[in-house]
Amino acid sequence: MRENVSNSQVQASCVVQAFAHAAHRLGANIYHHQEIRRFLTQGTKVTGVDTVQGETITCNQIIIASGTWAAQCGAWLNVRLPIHPLHGQLLSLPQTPLPLKHMVFGEAAYLVPRGSTILVGATKEDMGFDLNVTEQCIAEMVTTGHAPPIIQPFSAQRFLSSKSLSSI
């Protein structure tokens, strides 16, 4: 494992809040948790949206912050957006006695310090929007020959029998 100081990490929710705050300061109206039923258009210009909640919202410009669901929004406009969800599974381990302070990347895993825990990530699976944790991936992360030394003392059975498995 090597420390990679050229990579950084951000907390996505903080970045999104900062973007929303900046947009609001510039005059944007922000509509939270509004599911779009369809776009309203004039020619090639989007002029508004109809929501599942029954509201019509008009606009001069629109930003759709829908993440992985953006491909569906593109389809409404006859635009193919090559976006699809990747399922990633993580382990959360207790911080080491000598705390890990930086992200560390290995051949098949990475470590991210988060307060009193260390996140171990190593999976990317094309499972659509399925959020289930798979026992096979957790076992492989713990028992793989490429496992970082920090997780080698932990047994796969410890994770597989954990009540918190579904919340990892």
Image (cartoon, rainbow, N blue to C red):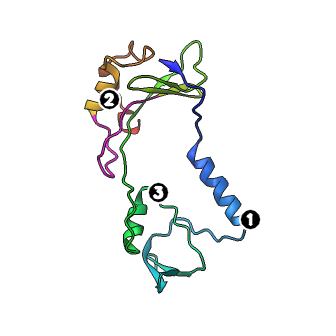
Mark identifier at residue 25: 1
Relative to 101, 21 lies left or right: right
Q: Main secondary structure of the magenta part?
A: loop
Location of the C terminus by quadrant is top left
Whole-percent x, y for residue 108 in the image:
38, 25
Q: What residue type is disc 1 on? A: Arg
What crowding class fits label 2: few (fewer than 14 Cα within 10 Å), some (14-19), or many (20 or more)?
many
Residue visible at 60% across and 79% down in the picture: 60
Judged from this view, the residue extending furthest toward the left is 136
Q: What residue type is disc 2 on? A: Ile
Q: Find residue 167 and report its image quarter.
A: top left
Circles 1 and 3: CB atoms closer than 8 Å: no
The CA span between labels 1 and 3 is 23 Å
Q: Can you tell which of label 2 and label 1 is closer to the viewer?
A: 1
Whole-percent x, y for residue 72 in the image:
37, 66
The residue identified by callout 3 is 67
Residue visible at 62% across and 49% down in the picture: 15
Residue visible at 59% across and 34% down in the picture: 8
Q: Earlier in the sequence, mark 2 or mark 1?
A: 1
Q: Earlier in the sequence, mark 1 or mark 3?
A: 1
Q: Find residue 5 and report its image quarter.
A: top right
Which structural element holds mark 2? helix
Q: Can you tell which of label 2 and label 3 is closer to the viewer?
A: 3
Which structural element holds mark 3? helix
Q: Is residue 50 covered in magenta? A: no
Start-end of magenta stretch:
120-134
Up-down relation of residue 84 to residue 42 (above or below):
above
The CA span between labels 2 and 1 is 44 Å
The residue identified by callout 2 is 138
| Residue 79 vs residue 87, the one in the foreground | 79
Whole-percent x, y for residue 47 in the image:
53, 82
Up-down relation of residue 3 to residue 77 (above or below):
above
